Amino acid sequence: MTARNQPGLPKSRFVSRILFACVLCTLVLAQPEGKQLTIYAPQASYSVPIIERGGLEYADLVGTLEPLGSVSTKIEGRKLKLSFNKSQGEFTQEKTKSKLAKKSIDLPAPFRIEDNRGLLPLSAVPQVLSALTGMTPDYHATSRRLFLNGTATRYTVDTKKDPSRLVFTFTSPVNPVIATDAGHLRMTFRREPLLGSAPANYDGKQVAFSEQNGVAQIDVATGIPLIASFGDGARTITLTPVAPPSVPAQAAVPAPIPPMIGSAAPAQPPPRPRNAVVIDPAHGGDDTGATLAPGVYEKDITLAFARRLHQELETRGIVALILRNNDVSIAPEQRASSANASGASLYVALHASASGAGVRIFTFPFSEAVTRSVTFIPWDEAQRRFLQASSTAASALVTQFLKQDLPSQAIAAPVRPLNNIAASAVAVEVEPPPSADAEALQSPEYQKTVAAAIAAAIAGLHPEAR
Amino acid sequence: MSRRLLIAVLALLIAVAALGYYVGRLKRHAEIAALATPEASAPIPASGSQEHITIYVPNDSQGSLMKRDAVATTANDSNSRARAALRALLSACRENGSPHPISGAPDIDAVFIVDNNLAVIDANAALSKGHASGIMVEQLTVAAMAETLAANVPGITRVKLLVDGKDSGTLAGHLDLNAVYDIATFKDWIAQ
């Protein structure tokens, strides 16, 4: 029963409940702060949110496997049947006995089935991935980082050429988020399978490696302000002291550098992801969206596309947030509120349709220009002042799809909640490729092609974010 | 327990079981009837004269509108003429092999012309129910209605779609029907 239905409910309690609900929604949607498992495989690096049930930690079975191959599940009563590439598996609700690739295995905790998805005990993820992919796992349990088949990036530190500088050389290109404050610099590696070594001292500069919650960090303590620069195709990062100030000490602290991925930013407060992208898989929960084929719902296809797009964006060093990472219903207003609160510069709603062929990009149509000198912008017109930027994003997406030989066009259509978004906003409706039926929307190859094209277009919009 | 009581209990149990079976059958029949697609009934012609009119039929695969001739029973007043034109459009969408199929029995309950330029279309719920779901496919229906009205009722520049007399949120899950559509925005959609 809602507060509105209780006639005697005091107004203050009603307001406090609304506030509590808002805080709860914000917490639920603020996934980047939550616990996560990061998996590093030769073909992809990706993070999976951790779900806690009964004091145990779980990961979504499909989410852990999807970037590694073609995966599908079928729930029959208390059993979940898994198909991954050419291997089959079977899990039972609340049981530890499972079958994988014709072998019986014991999970360390009971398997769970919730909302038509399987939840795998976190500690079983290395065992299950190894059984299904044949890759050797190396699991760092305390930091929740899983390395498959020896995937790793290592680094060395050099001060030989110039003792005032620290040169980090990595075995593969990296793109960390870098934050600085006076005398301290932190590099956070979200996607790189970085492995480190013991803390060391280089001419008074302390360098320490640490890993936690699926990310790796290198902290450098020098006592003087540092700036970072990339070189050798992002294989080296050089830390250089800022020139000594000639003004009084009070003004010596360097002005905060605008937060940006891949560049230096103030450590406190945390950098705001200015060029972040919010991915909104449309529909979810009771709202299944279109029925694209028997038993195939739009809500599931949009989620699959969203996960692939998230991966493609992060591969390109672009911070991406997914508004819905499981099968839940979210109201359009709530989606818009979360997107606006994230401070992201681009909102991409993903839809799928069985009609037509190719990919269509929609922006919100506002019939006439309105010039108002008001402090507050009407909620339904939040998008109006970003229309030009939205059209630019739509054009970039169309160009990228046409390069992939996919029919594409940019169209204006009133689709909620595009009008409530206070940033560039587009809705992308993915249709089957030419001469294919709706089943093609489930194809991992097609999903990857579309996601890669969207990511490439977005990367082109914000080249400085790379 | 006496023999009579036992027989009475058994008879009652058999009666309950038979009644349960009968109720189950009735329920199943009702479900099947509800699931069955309603027979596509031909629109009841409005009183008036037969006339060749222009309609714009959506083509889902091309994402465009195709100009077509149709025969409709038209009347002199703008409201009835607009309704007849839209019913001819829906009939075309219900034909076998239509490039923009709408199943069931979609119909237009009324069209109200407001201020000589805004057409408020009141469609029945079957239009939403039988319509494919998707942004483009839903927008094509609105575009086809708008262009068909513009071709047959002079002066119409904007359209608004209601379902069962109400603002229904979306047409089939995507397109916001709270909006008033400017017909001029659909001109480019007509296939040349």
Image (cartoon, rainbow, N blue to C red):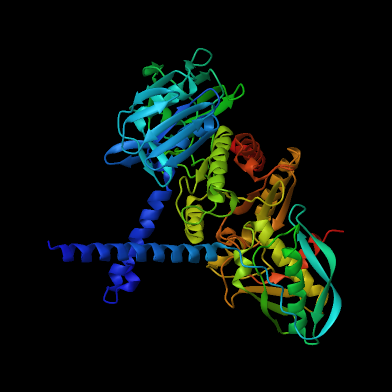
Judge left or right: residue B161 versus residue A321. right
Q: Position of residue B21 (x, y in %)?
A: 39, 62
| Residue B169 left/right relative to B57 | left
Quadrant location, the N terminus of chain A: bottom left
Q: Residue at x 52, y 19 (%)?
A: A170
Give the residue at the far left of this rendering: B1
Which residue sits at x=84%, y=80%? B50
Query: Can you say whether A363 is above or below A205 in the image?
Result: below
Q: Position of residue A383 (x, y in %)?
A: 60, 60
Q: Nearer the viewer, residue B3 or B47?
A: B3
User: What is the x, y in percent for residue A220?
Assistant: 41, 26
Q: Is residue A70 above or below residue A197?
A: below
- Numbered label tally: 0
Q: Quadrant of the C terminus of chain A?
A: top right
Work out whether residue A207 can be spotted. Answer: no
From the viewer's side, name the closer residue of A253 and A344. Answer: A344
Q: Residue furthest front?
A: B3
Residue A262 at least partly seen? yes
Q: Nearer the viewer, residue A387 or B32?
A: B32
In the displayed structure, does residue A305 sit left or right of residue B59? Answer: left
Q: Position of residue B3 (x, y in %)?
A: 16, 62
Residue projecting furthest to the top? A160
